[in-house]
C-alpha cells in the first residue's frame, strides 16, 4: 500500500510539472572521497580551501566518435563567451559569486582556474546535469549542438587550438 501511495504521489508531481534539481556539491568541504556524491571526488583543488568535493569526470562522459575533437579556440570559446562569460563567469564575476575561476581564459592565471581546469565541471553542469545556466533566470543557454560540442571537447581532453596557436592566430 505504501509503495502504491508513493508511486501515486510521484505521478501526481510529474503530472503537475514538478522538477527535481540535483544540488551542486562542488566546493563542499570533505576529508575523503566517501564524503562526496558519486560524480565527485575529494581533492585539494582550491587555493586556501582545504579539501573539497569537485567533479572530475561526470557521468555520461564518453569517448564520442563524431569527427575531430572540438578545440577551445575554434569551437568552445565562442560558446562560453555567449552563454557563460557574458552573464557571470568572465572578468566580472559579481553575478556568479565565484571569483576562483573564469571561463574567458583557457589556462589558470594567478590562482584563478581557467576553462581547461574547469572542463570536467563545465561538462557536468552544462551537459550532464544541465544546471548551467541556472534554470529560470532568463540567461542565454547553449543549443543542443553546442552542448554536444562541449561534451566532445571535455571528453577529448579539452584541447586548446588545433594549430597549437592562440585564439587570435590567423586573424
Image (spheres, rainbow, N blue to C red):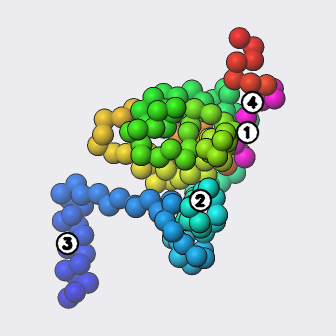
Q: Which mark, by number, is residue 9?
A: 3
Give how far across and how far down residue 120 sits, in percent.
Answer: 61, 52
Q: CA distance from mark 2 to mark 1?
A: 28 Å
**Residue visible at 20% across and 73% down?**
8
Q: Residues within 10 Å of mark 2 (few under 14, many from 20)?
A: few
Q: Which mark, by number, is residue 159?
A: 1
Q: Which residues are magenta?
A: 157-164
Q: CA distance from mark 1 to mark 4?
A: 6 Å
Mark 2 and mark 4 residues within 8 Å of each other at the beta carbon: no
Label 4: which residue? 161
Mark 1 and mark 4 residues within 8 Å of each other at the beta carbon: yes
Q: Which mark, by number, is residue 104?
A: none
Give how far across and how far down residue 56 sits, in percent.
Answer: 63, 59
| Lower sequence index among marks 2 and 1 | 2
* Residue that sits furthest to the right in the current view: 164
Q: CA distance from mark 3 to mark 2?
A: 45 Å
Q: Quadrant of residue 72?
A: top right
Label 2: which residue? 48
Amino acid at each position: 500500500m505504501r509503495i502504491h501511495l508513493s508511486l501515486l504521489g510521484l505521478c501526481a508531481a510529474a503530472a503537475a510539472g514538478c522538477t527535481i534539481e540535483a544540488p551542486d556539491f562542488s566546493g563542499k568541504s570533505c576529508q575523503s572521497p566517501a564524503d562526496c556524491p558519486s560524480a565527485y571526488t575529494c581533492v585539494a583543488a582550491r587555493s586556501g580551501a582545504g579539501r573539497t568535493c569537485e567533479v572530475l569526470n561526470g557521468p555520461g562522459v564518453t569517448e564520442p566518435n563524431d569527427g575531430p575533437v572540438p578545440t577551445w579556440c575554434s569551437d568552445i570559446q565562442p560558446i562560453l563567451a555567449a552563454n557563460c562569460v557574458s552573464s557571470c563567469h568572465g572578468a566580472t564575476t559579481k553575478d556568479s559569486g565565484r571569483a576562483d575561476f573564469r571561463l574567458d581564459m583557457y589556462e589558470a592565471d594567478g590562482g584563478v582556474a581557467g576553462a581547461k581546469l574547469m572542463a570536467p565541471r563545465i561538462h557536468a553542469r552544462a551537459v550532464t546535469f544541465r544546471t548551467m545556466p541556472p534554470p529560470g533566470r532568463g540567461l542565454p543557454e547553449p543549443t543542443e549542438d553546442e552542448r554536444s560540442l562541449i561534451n566532445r571537447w571535455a571528453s577529448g581532453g579539452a584541447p586548446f587550438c588545433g594549430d597549437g596557436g592562440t585564439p587570435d592566430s590567423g586573424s
